[in-house]
Image (cartoon, coloured by chain):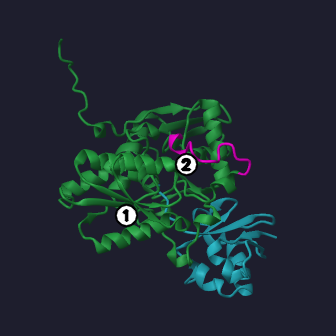
């Protein structure tokens, strides 16, 4: 048998990025507004976080900061942990994830299957609690290496060089970029890259409205703004309730057959709101993951979605 | 009259209310009205005359930082939502 001319990838990490971009004509409210979705759930571990996990490890190895024998530590409510677990396994590092106690069972199970160790932070403190606990653990144990997605410049850079560049190469026009707001990495990096190609592009964040049960901070001083997030670089910042996110998710599934995660539903909801304001244009939605990790959640059949979802952190 | 949604973190400062009605046609005026009635809120919401870094204010579901900040217009019947800055990012 003859050898193939093109070399095939030798690692799953070679398949990170270059995700499909698909038009969503059945979702668009008017023919003059074209909606596109970047399907980040097609990354090897199932989410956009594969991009930053790989980029953060590459950068830390290149600088010499990360060497064999160190253990990775990261606060995450799921996707970053799963992405790091895959990358860490292939690169030979053990991983500890600090995870709010109330995340879906799929996320926890996946982390365990990839071999990550899990440390729980109080569910009532949401993601802020995971960040706080991870910082404490890293201070007490110097052998930990914490990539720390919230402050790591490799995070937005992965989206500048990857997500944003891929969208800019695929389309001749982009008027609006919509992505979920978490660390701010996607919006900062992809937003900056798209502004270079399309100077008037509007960069819009879809932001979760957390339930009361996960806002158990003692005071506003316990709040947290990720260092990599510069809100002045966002043109719009739209709050999306859990119920609105789920209605967006259902629309995606019903009209286009795209099975998205909760933040994808929120992005679609925000995109449709912005589409109403446009006479014509091109809107790109970054859909961070698929719906698989949310199947056990009880919102699918709930009559009161906000109550069903209020006790957990979704993105 | 605009309604203001109060996050759990601030409820102790406003006698436990989840939502309050307030006077004002801008975010600044609404916040001033709240602070006048509930003085402990002053140190929580404002810093050097600006919104404190860890508080987010939304009018019509949009962060006022990407609108006109404290000058953002508030109309009768609008809901103003106060939230602590939370880490996301899964």
* Residue A255 versus residue A56 in the image, above or below: above
Relative image position of residue A296 (x, y in whole percent):
57, 45
Dot 1: within a 10 Å radius of its alpha carbon, few (fewer than 14), some, or many (20 or more) residues?
Answer: some
Q: Secondary structure at mark 2?
A: helix
Q: Is residue A255 left or right of residue A94?
A: right
Residue lying at 58% horizontally and 65% vertically, measured from the top left: A214
**Tint of chain A:** green
Q: Secondary structure at mark 1?
A: loop
User: In the rendered structure, which segment of residues is drawn in magenta?
Assistant: A291-304
Residue at the spot of label 2: A263
* Residue A208 figure quarter: bottom right
Residue A59, horizontal then vertical, whole percent? 25, 54
Would residue A19 be counted in the magenta stretch? Answer: no
In the rendered structure, the colour chosen for chain B is cyan
Q: CA distance from mark 2 to mark 1?
A: 21 Å
- Tell me the chief SS of the magenta region: loop
Q: Is residue A231 above or below residue A191?
A: below
Where in the figure is residue A120, as x and y percent of width and height? Answer: 44, 63
Give the side of residue A210 with respect to residue A146, left or right.
right
Q: Which mark is residue A151?
A: 1
- Residue A303 belongs to magenta span: yes
Q: Nearer the viewer, residue A270 or B8?
A: B8
Chain designation of label 1: A
Viewer-nearest of labels 2 and 1?
2
């Amino acid at each position: 048998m003859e050898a193939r001319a093109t070399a095939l990838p030798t690692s799953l990490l070679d398949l990170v990025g270059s995700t499909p971009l698909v038009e969503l004509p059945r979702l668009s409210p008017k023919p003059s507004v074209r909606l596109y979705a970047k399907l980040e759930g097609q990354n090897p571990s199932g989410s956009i976080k594969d991009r930053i996990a790989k980029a953060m490890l590459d950068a830390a190895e290149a600088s010499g900061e990360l060497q064999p024998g160190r253990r990775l530590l990261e606060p995450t409510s799921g996707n970053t942990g799963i992405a790091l677990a895959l990358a860490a396994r292939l690169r030979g590092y053990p991983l500890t994830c600090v995870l709010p106690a109330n995340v879906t069972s799929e996320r926890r199970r996946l982390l365990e299957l990839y071999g990550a160790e899990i440390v729980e932070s109080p569910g009532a403190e949401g993601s802020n609690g995971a960040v706080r606990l991870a910082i404490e653990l890293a201070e007490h144990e110097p052998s930990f290496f914490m990539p720390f997605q919230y402050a790591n410049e490799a995070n937005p850079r992965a989206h500048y060089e990857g997500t944003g560049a891929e969208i800019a190469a695929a389309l001749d026009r982009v008027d609006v970029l919509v992505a979920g707001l978490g660390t701010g990495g996607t919006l900062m990096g992809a937003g900056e890259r798209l502004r270079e190609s399309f100077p008037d592009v509007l960069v819009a964040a879809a932001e979760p409205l957390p339930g009361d049960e996960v806002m158990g901070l003692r005071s506003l001083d316990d709040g947290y703004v990720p260092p990599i997030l510069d809100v002045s670089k966002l043109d719009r910042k739209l709050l999306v309730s859990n119920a609105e996110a789920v209605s967006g998710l259902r629309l995606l599934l019903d009209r286009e057959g795209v099975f998205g995660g909760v933040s994808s539903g929120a992005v679609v909801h925000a995109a449709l709101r912005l589409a109403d304001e446009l006479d014509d244009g091109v809107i790109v939605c970054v859909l961070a993951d698929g719906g698989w990790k949310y199947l056990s959640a009880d919102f699918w059949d709930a009559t009161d979605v906000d109550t069903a979802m209020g006790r957990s952190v979704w993105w | 009259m605009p309604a203001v949604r109060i996050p759990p973190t601030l409820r102790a400062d406003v006698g436990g209310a989840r939502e309050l009605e307030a006077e004002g046609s801008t975010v600044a005026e609404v916040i001033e009205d709240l602070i006048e009635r509930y003085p402990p809120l002053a140190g929580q919401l404002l810093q050097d005359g600006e919104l404190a870094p860890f508080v987010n204010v939304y009018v019509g579901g949009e962060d006022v930082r990407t609108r006109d900040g404290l000058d953002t217009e508030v109309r009768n019947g609008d809901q103003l939502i106060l939230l602590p800055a939370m880490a996301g990012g899964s």
